[in-house]
Image (cartoon, rainbow, N blue to C red):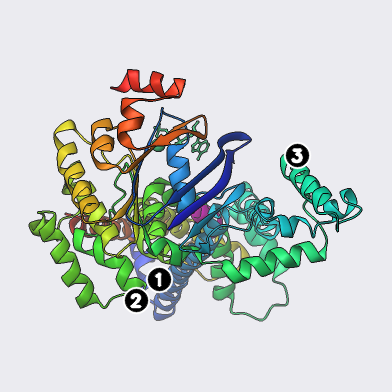
Amino acid sequence: MISVKNIFKDFHKTEVLKGVSIDVEKGEKIALIGPSGSGKSTLLRCMNLLEQVKYGEVWLDGRLLTPVDPYLHPDIIAKSKTFAKLCPEPGNAELKAEVISKIKKEDLLKKHEGAEFHSAVRRYLKENRLNANLARRSMGMVFQQFNLFNNMNVLKNMVFAPVKLKIMTKEQAEEKALKLLDRIGLPDKKYAFPSSLSGGQKQRIAIARSLMMNPEVMLFDEPTSALDPEMVGEVLGLIKELADEGMTMVIVTHEMAFARECATRVMFMDGGKILEEGAPDDIFGSPKNERLKEFLSKVL
Amino acid sequence: MNSWQIFWNRVKNPGTINSILTGLQNTAVIAVFGLLLGFVIGCLLATVKIIQSKNPAVKGLQYLADGYIAVFRGTPMMVQLLLLHFAVFIGVKIAPVAEVSLIFGLNSGAYMAEIIRSGINAVDRGQTEAGRALGLGFTAVMLKIVLPQAIKNILPTIGNEFISLLKETSIVSVIGLADLTRSFKAIADSTFEYFIPYVALALIYFVMVMIITVVIRLIERRLNRDKR
Ligand SMILES: Nc1ncnc2c1ncn2[C@@H]1O[C@H](COP(=O)(O)OP(=O)(O)OP(=O)(O)O)[C@@H](O)[C@H]1O
Ligand SMILES: [Mg+2]
């Protein structure tokens, strides 16, 4: 469903993601764990294009969301001037493969690589691209800080996007919103403004707001980290319900018990890379990577 | 006749009343249109400044916007008025009041840009991101989520900007425009009575400023009530 291919990301020259790949299949619940600053949020934000990647690609349902990364496409590299310079006989398959891997490894592609190369990139983009705003409709995102719209009441928070984007009429959206509010146990808050809600209520409404768009996958970035302890349960409970209903999700969390119980796959990130991944019982029960062991000994 | 009677007789004269009313109207027009134009220019400049892009055209625009703001904030209004009126807009066929409103708008735009930009920056980025994450476009997020909150936050500052703009319009008499100040200066000059006309003039400005202050406060209270 979501396919993250070898992404790199830097902020002002500090590399935060150093070649991360993930394939999220339909129905999977992936828990991303790792120490603070390891790049978990950045990875999630790259998936939903809130950050632009430097290298690599993000795909959703077979459509490309990011720009084309030529390094992932040997046939496009083969059209570059650099390739032509380094590979005198392109008919020689062995040499060709060697040169392509050298170009990849040493990051040799330049800004201008000739008309043929750039038109190949453009053609590939045109054939596969999905507009960011369309893609985001199918990816619900829930933030640590809730991020409700403070100038709108709860109902308006929920209906605004689907109505504005003409996915539903106002009546349909309100009907759906009221159902969702019922479900999360907050029907009497429909006219409340965010400033009057507790953290747990805000986060449940933020989740409901994402659900308004009928997303195919939900991305959660530490949804309970900003909550008072007594409110963590209500939010995790809602997420668990969604998981049980079969929602595909990627969740960054420091709640290890929750990850173990709820996830179908756990990924451990550190230093901008995924160092270990596997079934929850393996990751928590018999970790192999040294840093994962160290991390678990601190948090468990 | 005492000073008061001299002043009063003068004011009662229909010609004088007319010139005061015209002056009042010109002052109000310049202040209001200057503010509106300043707001529009300020919004444009602020938008240019907050766009995050490495596109050279955008970068170029951002330098232009910075230059514009620096120049208009870094020189006296009076000098801008003289320069633009006597050297730049010379030969441009446009009603003097419209021209002066334009000049005040250009000046106010530079201040507004900074006010609006700081107002936008004060709305936390998380809301923008949440909006974008729902698939909303930049414009929708800006117009319906960020700007309403920004404007609410900066309303008092815009009120202050309007007040200084209104008071500053009193310099337009240097280019011969018949504003409120000029109509009272005419009374003073022709009667050789200075105290009463100028106190009366000050009082009129003061009352206008008070009215604006009250109106702004009412709007603010209204906006806050909606948020409960
Ligand atoms: N907008 C930004 N500008 C500059 N540096 C950033 C930015 N966002 C993140 N970083 C840096 O990138 C690194 C990874 O950050 P990220 O937020 O992805 O970590 P994280 O794994 O989510 O950590 P945490 O568990 O604390 O949320 C950190 O060193 C952080 O300082
Ligand atoms: Mg984080």
In this view, the mark in front (1 or 2) = 2
What secondary structure is found at the residue carrying circle 1?
Answer: helix
Question: Where's the C terminus of chain B, which quadrant?
Answer: bottom left
Q: Residue at label 1?
A: B10
Q: Amino acid at mark 1?
A: Arg
Depth order, front residue of B169/B197:
B169
> Which residue occupies 47% across, 58% down?
B165
User: Neighbour class for label 2 at 10 Å: few (<14), some, many (≥20)?
Assistant: few
Same chain check for tags 1 and 3: no
Q: Residue at label 2?
A: A166
Q: Which residues are magenta?
A: B108-113
User: Neighbour class for label 3 at 10 Å: few (<14), some, many (≥20)?
Assistant: few
Disc 3 from disc 2: Cα separation? 47 Å
Q: Is mark 2 within 8 Å of ligand 1?
A: no
Q: Amino acid at mark 2?
A: Lys
Q: Residue at label 3?
A: A106
Q: CB of mark 1 within 8 Å of CB of mark 2?
A: no
